[in-house]
Image: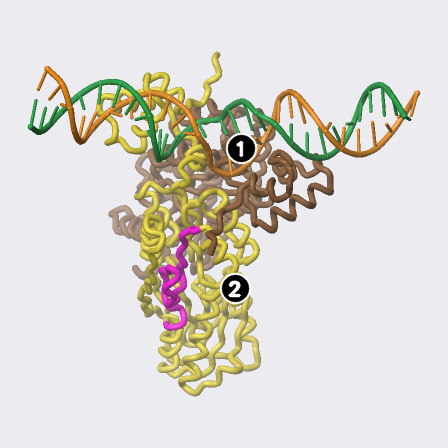
Chain colours: A brown, B yellow, C orange, D green
Amino acid sequence: MNKPEIPTLDDVAKEARVSTATVSRCLNFPDRVSSKTRDKVLKVVKDLGYTPNFGAQALAAKRTNTFGAIVPTMNNAIFAAGLQAFQEELGRNGATLLLASSSYSAEVEEEQIRSLVARGADGLLLIGTQRNEKIYSFLEDRKIPYVISWSYQDDKTRSCVGFDNFQASYELTTKAINLGHKKFAVISAHANSNDRAYNRVKGIRKALKDNNIDEQNLPLIECGYSIENGSQSFKAHIESNNRPTIVMCGNDVLAAGAVKQAHQMGLKIPEDISITGFDNIELASVIEPALTTVHVRHKRMGMVAAQVLLKQVEDKSYRENIKLETRIIEGKSLAKPS
Amino acid sequence: MNKPEIPTLDDVAKEARVSTATVSRCLNFPDRVSSKTRDKVLKVVKDLGYTPNFGAQALAAKRTNTFGAIVPTMNNAIFAAGLQAFQEELGRNGATLLLASSSYSAEVEEEQIRSLVARGADGLLLIGTQRNEKIYSFLEDRKIPYVISWSYQDDKTRSCVGFDNFQASYELTTKAINLGHKKFAVISAHANSNDRAYNRVKGIRKALKDNNIDEQNLPLIECGYSIENGSQSFKAHIESNNRPTIVMCGNDVLAAGAVKQAHQMGLKIPEDISITGFDNIELASVIEPALTTVHVRHKRMGMVAAQVLLKQVEDKSYRENIKLETRIIEGKSLAKPS
DNA sequence: TAAATAAATGTAAGCGCTTACATTTTGTAA
DNA sequence: TTACAAAATGTAAGCGCTTACATTTATTTA
């Protein structure tokens, strides 16, 4: 038994009786090589089962065709669809995704960014805008392209592909107000270092204010991201001595928890209490009654983000700010208060 | 403005007036260096903001502290919890996850495996057992550790951390039979190149056979993995001229679709029709009525898989077959037929 | 105090690739 | 046929790190 060594470029070159440069060219710039040698070399490549060594390639070529993404969590449908689309678009362009999750921690995210850059990521997908300035300069110093997604900001120095969380939330709230709601309660994900959550709450507050409803004393519970968190927070709101007629949730997962809890408490939705979500993940359509929520074009966002990122790699000065539209999904969980 | 170059080991060495070897040792084997030099070097590392170049490190050290995982899809809660745990456990050990998705295609998976190996993955997490033998020899030739998860097989030459899909499915079916069900219908994910789906169906068939219920003509619809697919398949089953009293779904996502469709068709669950799922993802608890399903310890699986993989990197001959228990979750969606 | 041993550090040879530049081969026009 | 340009191929210098081995410095022992 001879141990099967991993073949290198050299092995291929020797076997094909050409120089390593030619082999490299066959692989990377096929048309700079005569078709005769190309065929010969590619055959050897195939016979030997040669695969280029990534580290060596990265070291020599200073690019990796690898892109990094850091999401707050993988354990959550909110990011899944967008990421999947992002990955697919990269794949279509011969690039690979390196995925890390930060568990909603700014410090962890920073580490992950450094680690991905060290690993030679050609570009980065970042969720949301809120992070330490120095991490932005870190990326800019190294000329690492990045695009911010899930949030929109009008900043020509940075690319983003996202949507206006504030505006969408404002509209949904206005709708509720127009239906006659006056007693609001909010369940939100922790809003420090999460500008999506922050802006969604801000949108609610602004809508209340514009309609002369007290937003100073808006009952607001911030919690984690699980269904269970949503249930508990909902319970707390309902049992408070100033029971709301509507509970607006920062995202569909929390809303799902709220709905579940409402059932357990014997509350009819929307007769006894209205509940709204945000994101319109698939889950929203399964809940009974169907959730009134904000539709976000997650897939498109992922795809476009990948495209912008790839363009930025080609042209380091390219920037784009893309605001995707959102749309209120009329479920059955929001109705006029009784 | 001087352009900020990315600092290298050499820069650090020069600045700290030591050799590159010493810097490298400070970083990798701190205790082989006097505390005096170590402090001095680490300070420079920090001041310069030095991060080792991954490619160079991989090339020279022949390990990357990177592990790859290939999942059928990210767009699905079924894999999310397990993966998250896998990633967290790797993180705890200073390793990073490279994630790819195969879109349920065997060819794509094979490509991804090669790509991850080329990228220097120290080990791989694979979902399910079913794949071309040659891809296994590819990995074995290169001595790349891998562990199979989500499935269990008794094979001492390969590590796996999973559960017995066949057995769990058998038990759930038996339970339904004991309740009095005789007319079964099944919605399954495509079972070719998906041994989980295959074995779950097989478990159902075996249970039927063992109880003298015709399993040859079991109505079975294979479809994709979305809620929508579940809805459509459910509709088809109900509208068939041999309407079942129970629809067993290969996973919770399909079951969610089935439940949704049942509501739309005005069918009461479980009075008019029983529905079961598999996986017990968070979604299952939100559905009305709560889904009767099979609980799988996804988080534990991800964590243990990471541990086994890490051990295998240390000791290339280490193997382990771990079968995690499953448990039937008694929801409200399964009851005796009326 | 000198010799022997252990600890700390340095030297330099790669790891497997890409690519600027040099050289050879082929094709073309006069 | 010759001269020259264009195309194809080869040569070899790194890319930034790790690590075996050599050398220097500190510590211990007799």
Q: Nearer the viewer, mark 2 or mark 1?
A: 1
User: Which of the labelled discs sits on residue A63, or is there none?
Assistant: 1
Which residue is tagged 2? B193
Q: Is B66 part of what is drawn in magenta?
A: no
Residue B205 seen in render: yes
On the rendered structure, is B219 left or right of A76?
Answer: right
Above/below status of A37 relative to B71? above
Which of these two is toward me, B139 or A114? B139
Percent position of residue A297, x then y: 54, 45
Q: Nearer the viewer, residue B158 or A155?
A: B158
Query: For numbered disc 1, what is the local secondary structure?
Result: loop
Residue B256, quarter of picture: bottom left
Query: What chain is tagged by disc 2?
Result: B
Identify the residue at image location x=25%, y=27%.
B33
At 64% from the left and 43% from the top, the residue drawn is: A16
Residue B290, visible in the rendered structure: no
Residue furthest out toward the bottom: B212
The magenta segment is B143-167
Residue B242: give x, y in percent of width and height.
54, 82
Is residue B159 rendered magenta in the image? yes
Q: Are marks 2 and 1 on the same chain?
A: no
Labelled pair 2, 1 in contact (Cβ < 8 Å): no
